[in-house]
């Protein structure tokens, strides 16, 4: 049974925990939004992850994103996380918070 768990990613010791991706490594302001890069270690590499926040009508709204991109170096994952956040803002703006 443990073979099947590892095969499908259920038994890996590097599974993201409930707080995976919550350690902020870099923050950047972009068009009134705050992007926080929060890559986490997965499968021996760092996975692209982050949050985008903005105050809308007196309420702080947050959108969390995780992408499939993985990198051996943390710095590379941080930079791509920031770029992905900027891309999301450029494409969707405040619609990010409509979900």
Image (cartoon, rainbow, N blue to C red):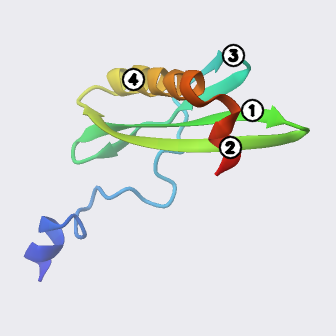
* Dot placed on the residue nearer the N-terminal end, 1 or 3: 3
Cα–Cα span, label 1 and label 3: 10 Å
Cα–Cα span, label 4 and label 2: 21 Å
Cα–Cα span, label 1 and label 2: 9 Å
Query: Which residue is located at x 62 percent, y 34 percent?
Result: 52
Dot 3 surroundings within 10 Å: few (below 14), some, or many (20 or more)?
few
Q: Is 82 above or below relative to 97?
A: above
Q: Is 10 above or below relative to 2?
A: above
Q: Which residue is mark 3?
A: 31
Q: Which residue is mark 4?
A: 80
Residue 54: % across, % down: 75, 32
Query: Which residue is located at x 48 percent, y 45 percent?
Result: 21
Is residue 56 or residue 75 the one in the foreground? 56
Dot 4 surroundings within 10 Å: few (below 14), some, or many (20 or more)?
many
Say whether marks 4 and 2 touch (CB < 8 Å).
Answer: no
Residue 74: % across, % down: 35, 27
Cα–Cα span, label 3 and label 2: 15 Å
Say whether marks 1 and 3 touch (CB < 8 Å).
Answer: no
Mark 4 vs mark 2: give the one in front.
2
Residue 62: % across, % down: 68, 42
> Which numbered dot is residue 75?
none
State which quadrant residue 91 falls in: top right
Secondary element under disc 4, as helix, strand or loop, is: helix
Say whether marks 1 and 2 touch (CB < 8 Å).
Answer: yes
Q: Which residue is mark 1?
A: 54
> Which numbered dot is residue 97?
2
* Dot placed on the residue nearer the N-terminal end, 4 or 3: 3
Query: So how many labels did they put on this image?
Result: 4
Dot 1 surroundings within 10 Å: few (below 14), some, or many (20 or more)?
some
């Amino acid at each position: 049974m443990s073979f099947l768990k590892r095969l499908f990613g259920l038994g890996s010791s590097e599974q993201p925990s409930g707080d995976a991706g919550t350690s902020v490594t870099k923050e950047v302001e972009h068009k009134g939004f705050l992007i926080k890069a929060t890559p986490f270690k997965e499968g021996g590499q760092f996975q692209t992850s982050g949050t985008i926040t903005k105050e809308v009508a007196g309420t702080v709204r947050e959108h969390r994103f995780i992408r499939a991109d993985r990198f051996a170096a943390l710095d590379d994952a941080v930079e791509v996380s920031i770029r992905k956040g900027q891309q999301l803002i450029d494409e969707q703006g405040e619609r990010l918070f409509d979900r």
